[in-house]
C-alpha cells in the first residue's frame, strides 16, 4: 500500500498551453488538443478527481467549439447574428468525460438564417472532428423549438441541460425566456411520462438490478444515467425548487455517489481509450489496485472490497431514482385531479386510529411525530410484513429521517425478539426487511448482518452481493404465496404450511453472514454470529438450536443433490438421519430452494428444482414410514438425560430411561427438553392418578397432552370429546413407549371462541374430558347430534378421500395413510372405526393442510400387522364412515 | 475427430469433470437433461398426491476430441461415472466430419485446441 497527496488540477490546465488564436486564423490543431488531453489524463491518473478532470475537458471543448465557430463565421464572412451554439446533455451540464460525444445545438432565428449559415455549421463541425471531438449535432430554428417532437423525446430531455457556447446571446435569451417556458408548460406531463417510460425500459434491459458481474457504469441501474434521470424527473414533476429537509440530505448523498461513479467512468474511458463504460473484471482489479474514488490516497485495495464500495454507491443512485420515480407529476392536471392526489379519499382504507393509512395500495404515514416511538415504527413494519402492502417512498423517507435523528427517538425501546418475530413470521417478511435494511434498522437489530452489507463474491456464479442474496432469498420465499411458475408449485405448498416460519427467516438472514468474517468456512462465522444474536434477542434454547441446525446444514440438501444419488435408499436414509423431523426437513428444503434461487436468476433451473423436490419427497416419506422402527434407546441419549435430570431434579436415571425407552425418535425432534421434562413430571404422577392431562394455550391454538397406560379406543375417545366441544384438531400425535405408556398430543383451535369468551368453560371441558377418559363416562351426550347443530360450511377446495395400506415400510406395523376432506369430528370417526376393529394405534401423525386432512396411523391387530383381508374390511368401514 | 456424448448420473458429474480436467480435457458442454433407458421411473405419493418419476434427471456431457485422445477420455468417463447400478448411463461415440472455429474460420483438429 502506498499513500500520496491528490494533485490539484487547474481548471484551465486543458487550455492554458494552447496557442492563442488570432483573427481569421484557427490556430488550434489536433496535436495541441491531443497534448492538452494527455495532460488532463496524466493529472487524472496522478489522482486528480473526476470533477476537476471533467471541468478541464469541458474547458478545452468550450474553447475549441467557440474558436471553431468563430473561425468558420469569419471564413464565410458572416457576422453570426441571429445564430447561437448551445451545449446540451452532459456537455451542457459541464460534465464531459474523456471520450464523450459533444452534444451541440445550432440554433437559428429563422429558416433564412439557417440556409445562409449551412456552410458555417458544416465547417465548424468538420473542424471539431479534426480536433478529435466526436460531435453529435442538431440544427433547429426558433420555430422548430416551439413544438414538441414526439419522435425525438431524447432531444427534449437533452435540452433540459443547456448552456450558451457561442453566437448571438439574444437568440439564446429568446429561447430561454419566451419559447422554452411555454413549451415546457405544455409538454411537461408528456415528457415526464416519456422519461419514466424510457427509464423503465432502460432498467428492464439490465434486469432491474444493479448487480452485474461487469456493470455498465453509465446505463445500468445504479449508473450515472440513474442520477441524471432522477434530476430530470424531479424537475419535470416538481419544477426547479431546491430540495429541502430529508430530500436535500438524500440529494447530497446521491451527489457524492455520482462523483464516485464519475471517477470510475473517467477511469474506464482512459483505460479503454474509447467511450466504453463497462467495468470489466480486469478493470475492476485495476481500479481496486488504484483504490479509485476512495480519496484517501491509499492504494492496493482488494477487488472484492472495492466492488463493495462501487455497489454501495450504485445502490445510492438507484434508490435516488426510485424515490424520484415515485413522485407524481402535478403538471397538466386539473384542480380536481390535484386535490384527489393531495388528500382525497380515493382508494383509502380506514386506519382505525393508527398513525398510518393504506392509500392507493401503498402504506402512507399520517402523523410523523407518532413514529418518534420505535414501537410505532415496528408496528408499521409488522403491518407491511403481514399484508404485503409496501411502504410508500415518502413513508420510507420519513421513517429514515426519524431514524437518522436519534434525538427524535425519545421513546425508543429495547430491541426484542418478539418485535422481530412478528415481522419474520408474516406472509411477506421480505416486504418489510428490505426497507428495514435500507433505513439501517435491520443492522440495528442484527449488527452481524452489517458484515455482509454490499459484500461482493467475485465469481461468475454469484450475481448479487451477499446482503442482497439473503434479502432476495426471503423475497423468493414470500412469492411462493402466489407462485406463477410450475417449477415453484410444490414448494408453495411447503411455504404455506411451514411451522415456525420466523426461525426460517432468521436463519436465512444469518446463513451467510460468516462470509463477511475472517474464518476458515463461512458457516463457522455464521454460527458464531447466531450465538451473539441469540444472546442479545434472548432466544430460547430450542429456537437457537433450530436456527443453528438450519445454518449449519444450509448446504446439505444441495450437496446431496449434486453429489449423491437421490434415488438411492441409503442416501435418503443418511440424509434424513441428519435432519430428524419432517418439520425441520420442510424448513431446510425451503431454505435450500431460496438459497439456490437467489444466487443468480438462472441458478434454480426446473431440473434442479425437481431434484430438490424429489429429495424432499423421498426424505419426508422415509421419515414418515420409518417412525416405528426408529425408536429411542434411552441409555444412548446422554446429551438429553443430563439436562432432564437437572430440570426434573430426578436423581434416579433409571426412571427417566424407563420413561423414554421405546418412544419413536421423532418424539425428541418435536418436543423441547422443557416439554419432555414436563411430560416426565406427568409420568411420575401416574402412580397417584392413572390419567394425566394438561391443557396449555398459545396465541392461536390449544394443546392437550394426555399421558396414561394404553387402552383400546383412547385416541378416538379424546378426539370425540374435542369434537363434541366443537374444537378443530389441526395436528395430533400419539406415541407409546416400551412400557405401554401412551403420550397423545392434540393441537386444536377453537373456531367458536368458546374458551376465549367463557374462560370458565375451560374447567368444565377438562372435567368433561376427565370423566370420559378416567371414569369411562359414555361419550354419547357430547356427540349427540353434533353434526346437526354445527353448521358445516361447504369446503372451498374439495379433496377426494384416499385410503392406503402399506405393509412393507414397517417390520411390526401396518401403515395406514388417509387423505380426506377435513371436517368436524373426522378424527373421532376414523378412530372409532379403528377401535371397532380392535386396531391398536402404535403411532399416529395427524396433520392438516388447508381443508385437507393427512393422517398416518401405525396399526397392529393382536400385536401383528393387518392381513390383506383385515385391511380390506377396515378400508370398507372407513370409506363408509368418511363418505 | 470424435464426438463423445455421455449421459451420466448427476451425482457423478463433479467427479467426471474433475477426472477429465486432470487428463487435460478443456472443452466440454454440459446439459441438465431428463430421460430413461432400462432404469424406469417410479411413483412417490406425498400427502395424497402422486408424483411419478418417469423421466429421471441425468447430466449430458458433449465433447469433441482429436482421434488420439478419444479412447482415454472414454475410459476416464467409464471409470468415474460407474457405480455399478442400473441407471449409470451411456456413452455414444461418433466420427465427426469437420470442426470450424467461428472466430477465424480455422478447420479440423486445430480448431479444437
Image (cartoon, coloured by chain):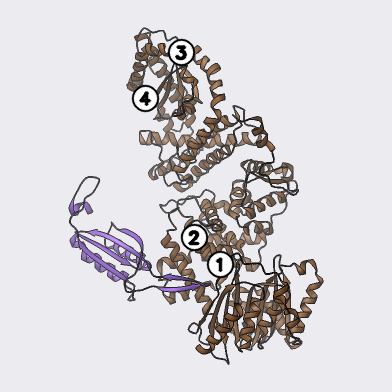
Q: Chain of mark 1?
A: A
Q: Position of residue A74 (x, y in %)?
A: 37, 9
Do marks 2 and 4 share a subunit?
Answer: yes
**Total of numbered circles in the picture?**
4
> Which residue is painted at 72% across and 76% down in the image?
A786
Q: On the image, numbered disc 2 is attached to which residue?
A: A488
Do marks 1 and 4 share a subunit?
Answer: yes
Q: Position of residue A758 (x, y in %)?
A: 80, 69
Q: Chain of mark 3?
A: A
* In-front residue for pair A321/A190: A190
| Circles 2, 1 touching at the beta carbon (< 8 Å) | no
Judged from the image, the secondary structure of the residue bearing numbered disc 3 is loop
Q: Which mark is residue A109?
A: 3
Q: Chain of mark 2?
A: A
| Circles 4, 3 touching at the beta carbon (< 8 Å) | no
Say which label, 1 or 4, has the lower sequence index: 4
Judged from the image, the secondary structure of the residue bearing numbered disc 1 is helix
Q: On the image, numbered disc 4 is attached to which residue?
A: A133
Q: On the image, numbered disc 1 is attached to which residue?
A: A549
Q: CA distance from mark 2 to mark 1?
A: 24 Å
Q: Position of residue A261 (x, y in %)?
A: 48, 37
Q: CA distance from mark 2 to mark 3?
A: 63 Å
Say which label, 4 or 3, has the lower sequence index: 3
Toward which corner of the image does residue A719 lie, by quadrant? bottom right
Q: Position of residue A433 (x, y in %)?
A: 60, 52
* Horizontal side, residue A34 vs residue A558: left or right: left
Apparent colour of chain B: purple
Q: CA distance from mark 4 to mark 3?
A: 26 Å
Q: Is residue A664 visible?
A: no
Do marks 2 and 1 share a subunit?
Answer: yes
Apparent colour of chain A: brown
Amino acid at each position: 500500500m502506498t499513500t500520496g497527496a491528490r494533485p490539484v488540477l487547474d481548471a484551465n490546465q486543458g487550455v492554458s498551453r494552447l496557442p492563442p488564436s488570432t483573427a481569421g486564423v484557427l490556430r488550434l490543431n489536433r496535436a495541441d488538443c491531443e497534448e492538452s488531453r494527455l495532460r488532463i489524463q496524466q493529472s487524472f491518473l496522478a489522482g486528480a478527481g473526476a470533477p476537476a478532470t471533467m471541468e478541464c475537458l469541458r474547458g478545452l471543448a468550450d474553447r475549441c467549439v467557440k474558436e471553431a465557430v468563430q473561425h468558420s463565421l469569419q471564413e464565410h464572412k458572416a457576422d453570426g447574428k441571429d445564430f447561437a451554439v448551445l451545449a446540451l446533455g452532459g456537455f451542457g451540464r459541464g460534465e464531459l468525460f474523456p471520450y464523450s460525444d459533444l452534444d451541440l445545438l445550432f440554433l437559428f432565428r429563422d429558416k433564412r438564417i439557417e440556409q445562409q449559415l449551412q456552410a458555417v455549421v458544416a465547417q465548424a463541425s468538420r473542424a471539431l472532428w479534426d480536433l478529435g471531438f466526436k460531435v453529435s449535432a442538431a440544427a433547429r430554428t426558433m420555430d422548430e423549438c416551439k413544438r414538441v417532437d414526439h419522435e425525438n423525446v431524447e432531444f427534449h430531455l437533452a435540452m433540459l441541460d443547456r448552456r450558451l457556447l457561442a453566437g448571438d446571446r439574444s437568440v439564446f435569451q429568446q429561447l430561454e425566456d419566451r419559447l422554452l417556458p411555454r413549451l415546457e408548460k405544455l409538454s411537461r406531463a408528456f415528457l415526464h411520462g416519456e422519461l419514466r417510460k424510457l427509464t423503465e425500459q432502460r432498467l428492464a434491459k439490465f434486469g432491474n438490478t444493479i448487480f452485474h458481474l461487469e456493470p455498465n457504469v453509465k446505463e445500468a441501474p445504479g449508473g450515472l444515467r440513474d442520477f441524471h434521470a432522477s434530476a430530470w424527473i424531479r424537475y419535470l414533476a416538481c419544477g426547479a425548487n431546491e430540495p429541502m429537509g430529508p430530500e436535500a440530505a438524500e440529494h447530497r448523498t446521491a451527489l457524492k455517489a455520482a462523483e464516485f461513479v464519475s471517477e470510475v467512468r473517467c477511469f474506464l474511458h482512459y483505460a479503454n481509450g474509447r467511450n466504453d463504460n463497462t467495468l470489466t473484471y480486469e478493470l475492476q482489479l485495476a481500479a481496486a489496485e488504484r483504490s479509485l474514488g476512495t480519496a484517501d490516497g491509499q492504494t492496493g485495495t482488494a477487488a472484492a472490497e472495492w466492488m463493495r464500495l462501487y455497489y454501495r454507491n450504485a445502490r445510492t443512485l438507484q434508490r435516488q431514482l426510485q424515490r424520484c420515480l415515485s413522485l407524481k407529476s402535478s403538471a397538466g392536471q386539473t384542480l380536481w385531479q390535484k386535490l384527489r392526489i393531495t388528500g382525497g379519499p380515493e382508494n383509502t382504507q380506514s386506519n382505525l386510529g393508527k398513525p398510518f393509512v393504506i392509500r392507493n395500495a401503498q402504506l402512507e404515514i399520517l402523523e410523523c411525530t407518532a413514529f418518534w416511538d420505535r414501537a410505532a415504527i415496528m408496528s408499521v413494519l409488522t403491518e407491511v410484513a403481514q399484508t404485503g402492502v409496501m411502504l410508500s417512498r415518502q413513508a420510507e423517507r420519513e421513517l429514515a429521517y426519524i431514524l437518522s435523528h436519534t434525538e427524535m427517538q425519545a421513546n425508543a425501546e429495547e430491541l426484542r425478539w418478539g418485535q422481530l418475530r412478528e415481522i419474520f413470521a408474516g406472509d411477506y417478511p421480505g416486504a418489510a426487511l428490505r426497507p428495514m435494511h435500507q433505513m439501517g434498522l435491520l443492522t440495528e437489530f442484527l449488527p452481524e448482518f452489517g458484515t455482509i452489507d454490499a459484500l461482493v463474491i467475485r465469481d461468475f456464479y454469484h450475481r448479487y452481493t451477499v446482503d442482497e442474496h439473503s434479502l432476495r432469498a426471503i423475497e423468493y420465499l414470500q412469492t411462493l404465496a402466489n407462485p406463477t411458475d410450475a417449477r415453484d408449485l410444490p414448494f408453495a405448498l411447503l411455504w404455506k404450511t411451514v411451522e415456525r416460519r420466523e426461525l426460517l427467516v432468521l436463519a436465512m438472514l444469518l446463513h451467510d453472514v460468516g462470509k463477511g468474517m475472517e474464518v476458515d468456512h463461512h458457516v463457522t462465522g455464521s454460527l458464531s454470529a447466531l450465538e451473539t444474536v441469540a444472546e442479545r434477542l434472548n432466544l430460547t434454547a430450542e429456537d437457537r438450536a433450530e436456527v443453528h441446525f438450519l445454518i449449519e446444514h444450509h448446504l446439505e440438501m444441495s450437496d446431496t443433490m449434486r453429489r449423491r444419488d437421490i434415488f438411492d435408499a441409503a442416501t435418503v436414509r443418511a440424509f434424513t438421519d441428519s435432519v430428524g423431523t419432517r418439520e425441520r426437513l420442510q424448513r431446510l428444503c425451503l431454505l435450500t430452494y431460496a438459497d439456490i434461487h437467489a444466487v443468480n436468476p438462472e441458478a434454480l433451473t426446473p431440473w434442479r428444482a425437481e431434484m430438490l423436490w424429489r429429495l424432499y419427497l423421498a426424505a419426508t416419506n422415509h421419515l414418515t414410514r420409518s417412525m416405528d422402527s426408529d425408536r429411542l434407546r434411552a441409555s444412548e441419549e446422554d446429551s438429553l438425560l443430563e439436562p432432564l435430570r437437572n430440570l426434573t431434579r430426578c436423581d434416579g436415571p433409571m426412571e427417566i430411561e424407563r420413561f423414554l425407552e421405546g418412544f419413536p425418535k421423532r418424539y425428541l425432534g418435536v418436543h423441547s427438553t422443557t416439554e419432555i421434562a414436563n411430560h416426565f413430571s406427568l409420568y411420575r404422577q401416574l402412580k397417584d392418578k392413572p390419567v394425566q392431562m394438561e391443557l396449555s394455550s398459545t396465541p392461536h391454538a390449544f394443546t392437550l397432552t394426555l399421558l396414561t397406560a394404553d387402552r383400546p379406543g383412547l385416541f378416538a375417545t379424546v378426539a370425540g370429546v374435542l369434537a363434541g366441544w366443537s374444537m378443530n384438531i389441526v395436528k395430533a400425535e400419539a406415541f407409546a413407549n416400551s412400557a405401554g405408556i401412551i403420550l397423545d398430543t392434540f393441537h386444536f383451535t377453537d373456531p367458536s371462541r368458546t374458551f376465549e369468551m367463557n374462560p370458565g368453560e375451560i374447567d368444565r371441558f377438562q372435567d368433561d374430558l376427565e370423566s370420559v377418559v378416567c371414569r369411562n363416562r359414555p361419550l354419547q351426550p357430547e356427540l349427540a347430534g353434533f353434526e346437526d347443530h354445527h353448521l358445516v360450511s361447504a369446503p372451498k377446495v374439495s379433496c377426494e378421500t384416499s385410503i392406503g395400506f402399506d405393509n412393507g415400510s414397517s417390520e411390526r406395523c401396518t401403515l395406514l395413510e388417509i387423505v380426506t376432506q377435513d371436517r368436524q369430528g373426522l378424527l373421532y370417526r376414523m378412530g372409532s372405526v379403528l377401535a371397532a376393529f380392535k386396531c391398536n394405534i402404535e403411532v399416529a401423525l395427524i396433520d392438516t393442510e388447508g381443508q385437507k386432512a393427512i393422517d398416518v396411523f401405525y396399526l397392529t391387530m393382536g400385536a401383528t400387522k393387518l392381513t390383506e383381508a383385515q385391511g380390506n374390511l377396515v378400508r370398507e368401514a372407513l370409506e363408509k364412515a368418511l363418505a | 475427430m470424435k464426438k463423445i456424448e455421455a449421459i451420466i448420473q448427476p451425482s457423478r458429474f463433479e467427479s467426471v469433470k474433475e477426472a477429465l480436467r486432470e487428463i487435460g480435457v478443456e472443452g466440454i458442454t454440459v446439459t441438465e437433461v431428463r430421460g430413461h433407458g432400462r432404469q424406469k421411473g417410479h411413483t412417490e405419493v406425498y400427502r395424497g398426491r402422486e408424483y411419478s418419476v418417469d423421466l429421471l434427471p441425468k447430466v449430458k456431457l458433449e465433447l469433441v476430441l482429436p482421434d488420439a485422445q478419444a479412447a482415454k477420455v472414454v475410459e476416464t468417463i467409464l471409470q468415474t461415472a460407474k457405480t455399478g447400478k442400473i441407471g449409470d448411463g451411456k456413452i455414444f461415440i461418433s466420427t465427426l466430419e469437420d470442426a470450424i472455429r467461428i472466430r477465424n474460420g480455422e478447420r479440423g483438429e486445430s480448431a479444437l485446441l
